[in-house]
Image: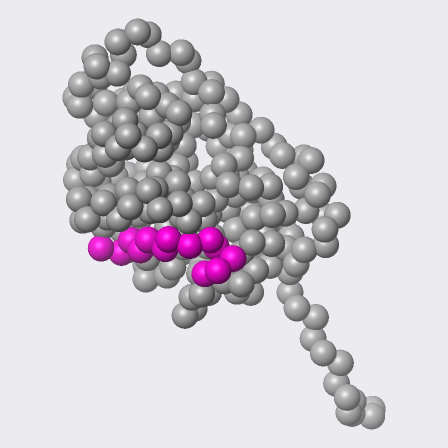
């Protein structure tokens, strides 16, 4: 999880919604995003759900809502520009979604995209279903399953993960749902050179399209996203080649 400054004693109780709203609005502006007041209010409602459920279900080790704005909301929103090529109506799958990160902030920022959250732990999946109901996220699906067991009617345009697994394990785990045009967006801390080497050594059918540095407002930590694209499948040789 990204490091942030240590909260002062009593910060959680002192963080009013107005203060959190100002922090979130500033983060959105610094990320270069345009989210209307309704979307920002929904993000704060989601944050309140995390805080409330976290008391019983330990969704995140972070307890201070102000730290959550940076570590969870702004961090998740930092990859929104990478979804510019994903059209409305397309499917995005968020693997190992946990508390809904980055999937739920992405669903709020890009409501036209259909997003399925994949989470095998029952209590966390129940939280995600509650978020869908309370936040009115109609395009959000919750799949209580391991991604290796998931079956989809069509390949997703993108698959995201955050603090889920190594690059190679992530790429291998989504083999059953990814298509030739699916892009993988793996959110990481510092550039994961060891994981990139492992990915190459395992000869998986993916290439590294980009390693994008993420500047997340309020985070004193290195963040990046590794973008993977499927390698083209070689054409089968023609058994009856035409003589020149």
Q: Residue at x 66, y 58 (%)?
A: 205
Work out which residue is located at the far right of the displayed protein and give it.
Answer: 244
Q: Position of residue 67 (x, y in %)?
A: 34, 21
Queried whether the magenta region covers residue 149, the answer comes back as yes
Q: Which sits in the foreground, 160 or 39?
A: 160
Most extreme residue toward the top is 9
Residue at x 21%, y 14% (from the top left corner): 13
Magenta stretch?
A: 138-150
Q: Is residue 210 left or right of residue 55?
A: right
Q: Position of residue 62 (x, y in %)?
A: 37, 23
Instruction: Point out residue 87 in the picture as x, y percentages from the top left corner.
Output: 37, 59
In the figure, 23 relative to 109: above or below?
A: above
Instruction: Check the image and report above or below for 227 versus 5.
Output: below
> Is 20 drawn above or below residue 72 in the view shown?
above
| Left or right of 236 in this view: 75 | left
What is the x, y in percent for residue 210? 59, 44
Residue 210 visible (yes or no): no
Vertical placement of residue 163 versus 208, above or below = above
* Color scheme of the displayed model: one colour
Nearer to the camera, 110 or 115:
115
> Can residue 19 be seen?
yes
Q: Quadrant of the C terminus?
A: bottom right
Please name the residue shown 26% across and 48% down the image: 129
Residue nearer the viewer, 183 or 212: 183
Give the quarter of the image for residue 108.
Answer: top left
Q: Which residue is painted at 28% across and 42% down in the image?
A: 127
Label count reads: 0
């Amino acid at each position: 999880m990204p490091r942030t400054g240590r909260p002062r004693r009593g910060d959680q109780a002192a963080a009013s919604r107005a203060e959190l709203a100002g922090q979130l609005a500033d983060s959105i502006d610094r990320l270069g995003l345009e989210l209307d007041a309704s979307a920002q209010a929904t993000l704060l409602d989601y944050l309140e759900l995390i805080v409330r459920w976290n008391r019983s279900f330990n969704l995140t080790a972070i307890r201070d809502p102000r730290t959550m704005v940076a570590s969870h909301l702004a961090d998740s929103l930092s990859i929104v520009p990478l979804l510019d090529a994903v059209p409305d109506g397309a499917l995005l799958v968020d693997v190992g979604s946990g508390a809904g990160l980055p999937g739920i902030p992405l669903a709020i920022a890009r409501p036209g995209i259909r997003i399925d959250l994949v989470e095998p732990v029952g209590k966390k999946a129940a939280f995600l279903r509650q978020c869908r109901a309370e936040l009115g996220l109609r395009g959000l699906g919750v799949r209580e399953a391991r991604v290796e067991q998931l079956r989809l009617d069509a390949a997703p345009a993108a698959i995201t993960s955050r603090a889920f697994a190594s690059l190679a394990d992530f790429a291998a785990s989504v083999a059953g749902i990814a298509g030739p045009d699916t892009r993988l967006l793996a959110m990481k801390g510092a550039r994961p050179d060891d994981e990139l080497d492992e990915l190459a050594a395992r000869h998986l059918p993916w290439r590294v399209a980009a390693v994008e540095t993420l500047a997340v407002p309020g985070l004193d930590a290195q963040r990046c996203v590794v973008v993977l694209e499927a390698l083209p499948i070689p054409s089968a040789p023609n058994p009856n080649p035409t003589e020149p």
